[in-house]
């Protein structure tokens, strides 16, 4: 139905400025002028008139072509005038909505939806900023449940019309960054389906237009309006989202080869600055919600602890152990942490990971102690007495380090001895034994930490899910049940169980590997790396071979295999190119599961999972600077061209290099 021109009126003097304003509101045109404040809205082109409810939440949005309500867009079906009031019928698919508008002042109105009780709204004015609309809210924040669920983010970004949109966010229990993409249509609308685990910080980036950081929850759907530097969010956690966008972050610093005591001085200074900045913000905006205050204090705590435990990678002290001053500060900060996290945070995850890594490292015999325990429980293993003696000797050496101030050289010597012992054990022990021992050593390290029980539960869940996601396999049943009993939070237990069951189902699903998994028979008994490679490459004479040394434990390796390699293979489909994958320190079960999960079985793809000694021999030839993943190229005659080939993420460069070899 065609609506009348909102600017069309008679010259009669009875049409006051207020009447003209009513006409414009009733016909849903934006009249707000930009300027000042946190954001800026302009009544130009694709502008939107926004109305906030008595809680300061954005509830209604109107353009000349559509309305926004309930986190979705509505089309105008009819527009009826009754004196100075308007009745609109809005349509979304088969759903209809009647909205009766009555302007009560230049900046307020009432809207009655489908005959329900009228609600009062205030017009958004960017010059005032969001704090002019927010009442005090002392409701304490709810703990994050970490229950994974999907949500839909719809939005209107007219300045980015026709551009690709990327949404980046981090998983709750692993460092994996998720990237969801879509296209913004020619009118500026977009829709993204996201899978979130609790309240999560996400970044929206649209081509060259810009980016915005939002916090979203899987509790329900959301709608974002982005225009001329303005961002308004409609949804469950929109208030916290607006508060975070309207306030500045806190200072940070990078550990740059400091002594522990110098690090402590810098961290104390940083902590004082961050706390003072938060105090000023709260004084300037006393109506900031309790949820914001709690979340800001939480983020400061995690950031400071991240910095402290990051010191283990940058310190110049002569001993691997932290100084008493640093440990004392870390202890006091951990005791003051909130009882339970309120949102998914990369800062929180990195602190937890670094903290656990440090205390695992300091318990030198911890992992070997759990290896010995697991061996004693599995009577079916036939481990030679000589190997068990080596295990006992290495365990004694690690225990001795606990009773003296160990220098870096002594610790390095122990690690070499431990690596040799574990390589020997790997010949006889099943991969499940290593997983069981490592998870038990993690749980043992977590138990004495001065953290609130809820934070310890998160760290235990993080350890369990980390093993599952790293190997793309369920945990061994015994250690799974044993570890799950140590988590007190029902929500976290349910989250871990969800991951375990998901991978059990995947493991039981049939899959056609299309002959890509190669047996090791052709290299049986060989120890020379050159000869092993010669045998493996022999069937591919006349083809270019691209090698990928990867491991189930290596997140960047799996990222490249999953996200970037498929596009390269598609571009070279049917050409004389072979993609040869060589797995490092990966169990057969995990090897097959990852290949299955990523569908990495194209006709030009070949996989080997060599015994440890043979893989080491090959890596002495192919591994570039000891880093994983490592990519190499062999020409058509089987000659190594480079062991530093472009990675799959550099698709164009890699294809160009391969094309040059194909022409020779």
Image: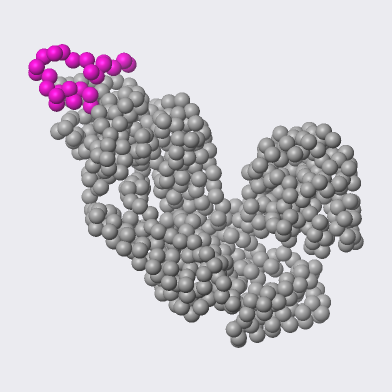
Q: Residue at x 43, y 68 (%)?
A: 266
Q: Is residue 331 left or right of residue 572?
A: left
Going by the picture, which residue comes out furthest to the left? 14
Dividing the picture into quadrants, the one containing residue 621 is bottom right
Boundaries of the magenta span: 1-25
x%, y% of residue 429? 76, 69
Q: Nearer the viewer, residue 575 or 392?
A: 575
Q: Is residue 610 left or right of residue 340?
A: right
Q: Residue at x 24, y 37 (%)?
A: 125
**Measured along the vertical axis of the image, is residue 382 above or below residue 236?**
below
x%, y% of residue 442? 58, 70
Q: How many marks?
A: 0
Q: Nearer the viewer, residue 445 or 397?
A: 397
Magenta segment's dominant SS is: loop
Q: Is residue 337 left or right of residue 592?
A: left
Tell me the quadrant of the picture where the N terminus can be found.
Answer: top left
Q: Is residue 189 visible?
A: no
Q: Residue at x 22, y 29 (%)?
A: 100
**Measured along the vertical axis of the image, is residue 146 above or below residue 427?**
above
Q: Is residue 301 visible?
A: yes
x%, y% of residue 270? 40, 65
Dividing the picture into quadrants, the one containing residue 273 is bottom left
Colour mode? one colour
Residue 24 is inside the magenta segment: yes
Q: Nearer the viewer, residue 449 or 639?
A: 639
Residue 362 is inside the magenta segment: no
Q: Residue at x 59, y 84 (%)?
A: 405
Dividing the picture into quadrants, the one containing residue 335 is bottom left
Tell me the quadrant of the picture where the C terminus can be found.
Answer: top right
Q: Is residue 589 left or right of residue 258?
A: right
x%, y% of residue 315? 55, 70
């Amino acid at each position: 139905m065609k609506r009348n021109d909102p600017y069309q009126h008679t010259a009669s003097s009875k049409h006051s400025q207020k009447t003209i304003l009513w006409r414009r509101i009733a016909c849903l045109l934006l009249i707000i002028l930009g300027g000042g404040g946190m954001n800026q809205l302009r009544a130009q082109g694709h502008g939107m008139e926004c109305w906030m409810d008595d809680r300061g939440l954005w509830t209604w949005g109107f353009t000349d072509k559509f309305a926004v309500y309930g986190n979705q867009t509505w089309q105008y079906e009819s527009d009826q005038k009754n004196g100075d009031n308007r009745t609109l019928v809005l349509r979304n698919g088969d759903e209809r909505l009647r909205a009766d508008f009555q302007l009560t002042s230049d900046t307020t109105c009432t809207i009655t939806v489908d005959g329900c009780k009228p609600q009062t709204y205030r017009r958004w004015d960017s010059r005032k900023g969001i704090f002019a609309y927010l009442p005090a809210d002392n409701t304490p924040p709810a703990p994050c449940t970490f229950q994974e669920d999907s949500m839909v983010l719809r939005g209107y970004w007219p300045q980015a019309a026709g551009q690709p949109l990327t949404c980046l966010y981090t998983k709750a229990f692993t460092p994996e960054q998720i990237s969801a993409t879509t296209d913004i249509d020619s009118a500026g609308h977009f829709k993204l389906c996201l899978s979130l685990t609790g309240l999560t910080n996400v970044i929206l980036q649209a081509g060259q237009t810009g980016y915005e950081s939002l916090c979203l929850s899987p509790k329900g759907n959301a709608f974002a309006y982005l225009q001329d530097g303005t961002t308004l969010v409609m949804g469950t956690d929109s208030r916290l989202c607006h508060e975070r966008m309207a306030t500045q972050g806190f200072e940070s610093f990078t550990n740059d080869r400091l002594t522990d005591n110098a690090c402590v001085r810098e961290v104390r200074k940083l902590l004082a600055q961050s706390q003072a900045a938060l105090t000023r913000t709260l004084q300037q905006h006393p109506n900031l919600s309790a949820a914001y205050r709690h979340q800001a204090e939480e983020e400061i705590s995690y950031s400071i602890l991240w910095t402290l435990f990051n010191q283990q990678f940058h310190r110049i002290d002569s001993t691997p152990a932290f100084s008493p001053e640093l440990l004392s500060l870390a202890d006091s900060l951990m005791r003051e942490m909130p009882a339970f996290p309120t949102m998914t945070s990369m800062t929180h995850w990195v602190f937890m990971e670094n903290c656990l890594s440090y205390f695992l490292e300091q318990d030198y015999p911890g992992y070997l102690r759990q290896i010995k325990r697991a061996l004693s429980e599995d009577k079916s293993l036939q481990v030679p007495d000589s190997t068990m003696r080596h295990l006992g000797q290495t365990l004694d050496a690690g225990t001795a380090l606990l009773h003296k101030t160990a220098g870096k050289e002594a610790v390095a010597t122990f690690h070499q001895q431990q690596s040799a012992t574990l390589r020997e054990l790997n010949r006889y022990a099943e991969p499940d034994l290593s997983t069981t021992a490592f998870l038990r050593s993690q749980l043992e390290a977590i138990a004495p930490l001065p953290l609130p029980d809820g934070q310890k539960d998160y760290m235990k869940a993080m350890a369990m899910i980390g093993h599952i996601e790293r190997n793309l396999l369920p945990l061994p049943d015994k250690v799974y049940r044993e570890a799950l009993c140590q988590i007190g939070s029902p929500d976290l237990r349910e989250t871990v169980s969800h991951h375990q069951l998901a991978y059990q189902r995947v493991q039981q699903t049939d899959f056609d590997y299309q002959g890509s998994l190669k047996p090791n028979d052709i290299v049986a008994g060989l120890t020379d790396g050159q000869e092993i490679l010669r045998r493996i490459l022999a069937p591919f004479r006349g083809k270019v071979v691209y090698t990928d040394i990867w491991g189930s434990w290596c997140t960047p390796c799996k990222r490249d295999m999953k996200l970037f390699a498929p596009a390269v293979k598609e571009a070279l489909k049917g050409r004389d190119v072979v993609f040869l994958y060589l797995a490092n320190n990966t169990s057969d079960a995990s090897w097959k599961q990852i290949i299955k999960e990523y569908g990495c079985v194209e006709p030009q793809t070949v996989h080997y999972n060599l015994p440890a000694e043979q893989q080491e021999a090959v890596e002495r030839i192919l591994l570039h600077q000891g880093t994983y993943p490592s990519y190499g190229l062999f020409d058509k005659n089987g000659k190594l061209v480079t062991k530093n080939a472009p990675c799959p993420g550099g698709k164009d460069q890699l294809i160009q290099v391969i094309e040059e070899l194909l022409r020779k």
